[in-house]
Image (spheres, rainbow, N blue to C red):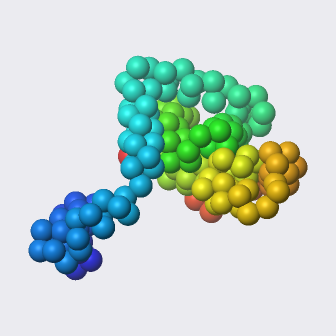
Amino acid sequence: VILFSLMEFGDLVFLGLAAVTCCVVFNVVHRELVLQRLNLPIFLTIAGGLGVGQAIKASGLANAWAKMVVAAGHHVAMGHPIGVLMALSFITSLLSNLMSHTATAALMAPIAMKVCAAESMKLKTAAIVLMLSANASFATPFATSANIMIKGMGPYEFHDYFKFGAPLQLLFLFAIPALCALQFGVTAPFEV
């Protein structure tokens, strides 16, 4: 799979799927074992998040939300594009504390693209802010599977996660956009 990918024979996802199919067909891995290891609820959540993201983009809701993000960002940072990145980071991290980080990233991706196009911002910088902010979810016990596992290990309550996670979330709210802006820059012509 890696060699075919390096030779640009096909997309890595399809090559991996072909490898798994060959393993099942030639009985290298038993079919029941593969089905047993698949986590169907996670795949359905990811698929649902991707579908919702596409629906938001197609319906025009992404444009409306993008305008709100830009307005909030400009208001907070007095017109500087870093404020727009902070607004994207805030909304993304807030949503990822309430739902799956994968679904959040899928939901926010079309919004980030519209924001970058409207503000002549680097898409790469916004995408990295989006990726890091979607995975920076510390304030709720159900935000990530790691938080859920830890909750089961001890007598932790919701307020314990919020008490220790909210300050860390606030630190990441400022650190992620600032470091991404320093590393990759903020404004540039929109590129896909």
| Rendering coords of residue 156 (x, y %) | 81, 54
Viewer-closest of 14 and 90? 14
Question: Which of the pair 103/70 is nearer the observer?
Answer: 103
Of 126 and 107, nearer the camera is 107
* Rendering quarter of residue 31: bottom left
How far across and down, in percent of the image, does residue 56 sit?
Answer: 44, 26
Q: Residue furthest left?
A: 26
Q: Where is residue 54 shown, x and y percent of the image? A: 38, 32
Q: Is residue 178 left or right of residue 190?
A: right
User: Does residue 158 appear left or right of residue 100 in this picture?
Assistant: right
Q: Residue at x 44, y 20 (%)?
A: 60
Q: Quadrant of residue 94?
A: top right
**Residue placed at 50% from the left, 42% from the top?**
103
Left or right position of 184 against 10: right
Using the image, determine if residue 167 lies above or below residue 31.
Answer: above
Q: Quadrant of the N terminus?
A: bottom left
Depicted 114 relative to depicted 181: above or below? above
| Residue at 65%, 38% in the rendered image | 98
Q: Total label count?
A: 0
Name of the residue lying farthest toward the front = 32
Residue 133 visible to an observer of this rendering? no
Reply above or below: 159 against 87.
Answer: below
Residue 77 seen by the camera: yes
Rendering coords of residue 99 (x, y %): 59, 40
Please name whichever residue, 35 or 111, is drawn nearer the observer in this view of the structure. 35
**Residue displayed at 78% across by 33% down:** 76
